[in-house]
Every structure is written in C-alpha cells, then in structure tokens.
Image (cartoon, grey):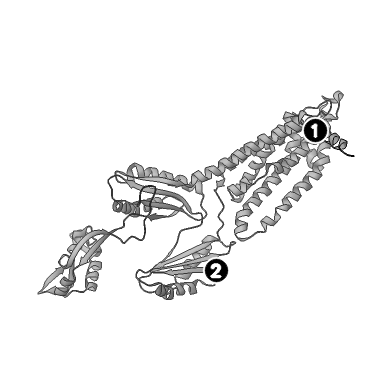
Amino acid sequence: MVSKLIDAILGQRLMVVFLAVLLLVGGLYAFKALNIEAYPDPSPPTIEVIAQNPGWSAEEMERQITVPIETQLNSMPGLDHIRSISLFGLSDIKCYFKYETDYNFDRQEVLNRLQMVQLPPGVQLQLSPTSAVGEIYRYQLVGQGHSLMDLKVVQDWLLERQFKQAPGVIDVVSFGGSTKEFHVDLDPNKLVAFNVSISQVLAALANSNSNVGANYLELGVQSYNVRGIGLFKDTEDIANVAVPASTKNGTPVYIKQLGDVSIGAKVSMGRVGKDDEDDIVQGVVLMRHGEKSLATLERVRQKVEQLNHGILPKGMRVVPYYDRTDLINITTQTVTHTLIEGVVLVAFILLAFLGDLRAALVVALTIPLSLLFTFIFMVLRGESANLISMGAIDFGIIVDASVVMVENICRHFAELGPSRQHAGQMRTLAVQLAAQEVSRPIFFSSAIIVAAFLPLFAMTGVEGKVFGPMALTYGFALTSALLLALTFAPVMASLVLKTRHEAKETFVVRTIRGGIRLFCVAHWRTQP
C-alpha cells in the first residue's frame, strides 16, 4: 500500500507541492487562531460555596451552615469528594468533581442543590469565581490627591462593574484600602433619657433608607407617579431620621439627638503593600473557566484604556503590574526560538554529513511543516498549546523519517552514473525505488515511537492534565512527519536534488573516519 502511495504522489508532484503550500498557509492561520496558555490547568472541576454570617463563632457556622450544605451536596453526579472549613463568620465548602465531568454541568448541579438547603435567616450563599489558572491581570489604582477611601470607593463601585463588562471576565477581587462606612455613634445616656433601644434605632434606619412607590395621581387627562424618596445620600440624611417608636411629650426623637453621625472606615482585616507603599488599592481580574487568555486579556486592556481616558475621576488611573500576556509571549518566543534553532541545527548537520545543501533544506522543511500540521489539528480539536506540550517536542525525532528517505534517494542518485545524469525518467525511477526500500522501516519506526507515548494517553488526574496535551501534540507531530516523509520528501527530492557522478564523503565524515582510523592504529600498536 505504501508503494502505491509513493507511485501516486510521484505522478502528481505539482499537486503535492500545491498541498504543501496550502498546508503552510493553513498552518500559519491555525497558529494565529491557536489558544496559547502559559501552562495547563491541572485542577479538577471545582465548585466553591461561600457563606458568611458576621458575628457567629466557628462552631455555630459549622453546625448550622456548613453541615446542612455538605449534607445536601453529597451524592451529586460525578462528585469525587468535598472539603470544608468553618471560621469565625465564614463557611467555605469546596466540591471536587471527577476530571471527566463537565464544569458547567457541575456548577449547575451545585446551584440546584443549594436551593433546597434550609439556612438561618439572613445567610446568603455565593459561588466563588476563582480557579487554579483564573488570575490573568493585576493592577493598582492610584490617584494623586485622593485618599485610600476614595480609591476604594471607585474600586468597589466603578472598576469592578466596568471590568465585568469585558467578555471572558467573571469577577474582580479587590484588596487593600479603606472601605467607606457611615457610623452612628449612640450615646447610652441619651438612649436612657429618651427611652430608646438600639433595636428601635436600627429599625428606624432600615425603614428610612429606601424608596417606596405609592400610586398614581390623576389630574385631568394626565396621571403622575407618586413615590417616596428615602435613600440616604449623606450624613445629614441619616442624622434627620426620626425614631417613631419613641417620643417624648409627642415630639419625635431624631438620630442626631441620640448620638453622632460620621463617615468612617470599616475594620480592616489586612492590607496590601507594594514596594515602598505600605497600603494600596489592588484589583485582581479573574477569567471565566474555559476562556481563552489572550482574547480575554486584550479586552481587559481595552477596558483599561477606556477607564484611564475618560471614565475614572480626574487624577485616578489604573496601573497594571501583572499581565499574563507577558508569560504567554515568553512561551511563544521559547517555541519559536527552539523551532528556528532546530531547523538551522538540523540543516547544518545534514549539510555536514550529506554534503548537499538542497537535501539538507528539504529535510529541514519537514520541521515547520510538521508543526503547522499539528497546529491545524489542535485548532480543529479545540486544544490549547502550552510550554510543556510545545517545548518538549524533539525535532530530531521529527526529521528522522525524512533524513532516512532523503539520504537513500541521494545514494540512488549517486549510483545513476554520469551517462544517466539528465535522464528524467531514470531520476523518477531512482526516487521510487529508494522510497520503496525505506518506506516500510520508516513506517514501523515511527509507529514504535508513537506507541511509546501511549501510556501518557492513559494517565488520569493531575498527570493526565499535565502530560496528556504533550502526548497528543507529539502524536500529531510524528504522524505529520511520517506523512511528509512519504509524500513531500520524495517529491521535493525528485524536483530539486541533482544526480552526482559518485558518492563523495564530506570533510566532516573524512575527519571522523581518519580520527577513528588513527585511534585504532594507536590502540593496535599498544597491544603486546
């Protein structure tokens, strides 16, 4: 069958050259569309559930929140195990699913189960957006003439909402700064004097801080919407809230009579420092699970440009200090650098040993064409390239088949003799005979190398996530190298190689042979 393939491609040499050019164009387009990551995601599908109830001890969080949630989430389809931790005011439950499950299905299953959990009043559940490789962008919000509280307000109420508008971004996590709060400092003596309890004050503040709709007021042929505006705007609005449940001699009591209203900061649970600054406002942009990093980062950078040129208050700007694009570019440059060095080194070695520049170039072209063939199949399968999968490719293994093919063709060309140097038919027959001689050994040697990677395909868990893409990339590259050795190499050899009067040894071969001969003679003379 291989012999028939070789006969067919030698009869359609222009078609093979055209397909090679088409492979070059399609491979370059596939490389542009290929999703490149810095490293593979080794984590299984993980859904994290977070519940908060300030003021509760870890014991109460465990008994009344964590345990009911775990009980309801158990026995989900594809669930591997659950890990949880209960802290002061915080419950964190992580659901680890099996690697073969679908992340979106697992997330939806968790949401469905959480609807049936009975929790204490006021406790709300949230799904954490974090993932093992979700962090793609870090920035610092700076502003000349603005306090840390001003920066924190802009971060929480403007930047987070703006970044979430970028497709591919699931959340923005902020750290540092001072969270703005309105503080009502009550005087205990005044509470006693006016016979007002703290619960009455809290109820009055909650009821007053809302907009309510009333009804329609008809005036002639027109109707007007009637509603009450009660949302607090500043400390004065809070100070003028009346406590209707407690009055003295029919006179309402206001908050300003019971204490002081001021703007303060929330109790800080930590701070973020950078270089010489001991407290900054920092944001971390998180990518949605399964999204492409480069495309998402490009949209994030566009959003930063919009923020810095018109949206942010005057004097504020977003200053990035981590961008995964730099790491991805290093990966791309590493692969490109290795590819160029591999092509040059292989061409140099073949030239040194074969003594034929054209033969060396024919073999060296196998490397980029094989990788472009690999890129096409990776894009079609929706696979991503990373430093492990691409950087581990051995170019020596890729060109082995083409080296054997081209070297055997050169040997047959040298055996044609000077009288048959310009006989095109004899050149074709020589290529056909040379290709048929080595086609079977080439096929089986490549099959053995591919078989050596089969255990990598059987790996599961973290090992499968890390080394599986490498094995797949190797399989594509070796398969493409074999096809090119059986089709492209014979055709290009018949078109560009020249027949020689006789096979001549190159300077490198003669030097090595002479060195071996001298070593053997010296060793023979030292024998007794």
Question: Which circle, 1 or 2, is nearer the viewer?
Answer: 1
Query: Which residue occupies the extreme left position in the image?
Result: 249
Q: Quadrant of residue 317?
A: top left
Q: Which mark is residue 100?
A: none
Is residue 319 or residue 121 the one in the foreground? 319
Does any portion of residue 215 appear in the rendered image? no
Q: Inspect the image, locate mark 1, and give the three-letter code of the amino acid beneath it.
A: Gly
Residue 375 rendering spot, x and y as whole percentages: 62, 44
- Which amino acid type corresponds to the residue marked 2 in the rendered image? His
- Residue 507 located left or right of residue 379: right
| Screen quadrant of the C terminus | top right
Q: Which mark is residue 81?
A: 2
Residue 341 in the figure: left or right of residue 417 = left
- The answer to whether marks 1 and 2 mark residues whose Cβ atoms lie closer than 8 Å is no
Work out whether 326 lies above or below 184. above
Residue 133: percent from left, percent from top: 51, 54
Q: Residue furthest right?
A: 528
Percent across and percent down for residue 369 are 66, 39
Where disc 2 sits, the SS reads strand
> For mark 2, does the 10 Å Cα neighbourhood hold few (<14), some (14 to 19), or many (20 or more) residues?
few
Please say if 312 is above or below 127.
Answer: above
Work out whether residue 154 or residue 345 is closer to the camera in this orientation and state it.
Answer: 345
Q: Earlier in the sequence, mark 1 or mark 2?
A: 2
Q: In this rendering, is residue 31 above or below 44? A: above
Could you say which is closer to the camera, residue 275 or residue 416? 275
Residue 278 is left or right of residue 127, and the answer is left
Of the numbered discs in the image, which one, if any, rests on residue 515?
A: 1
Q: Quadrant of the N terminus?
A: top right
Q: Secondary structure at mark 1?
A: helix
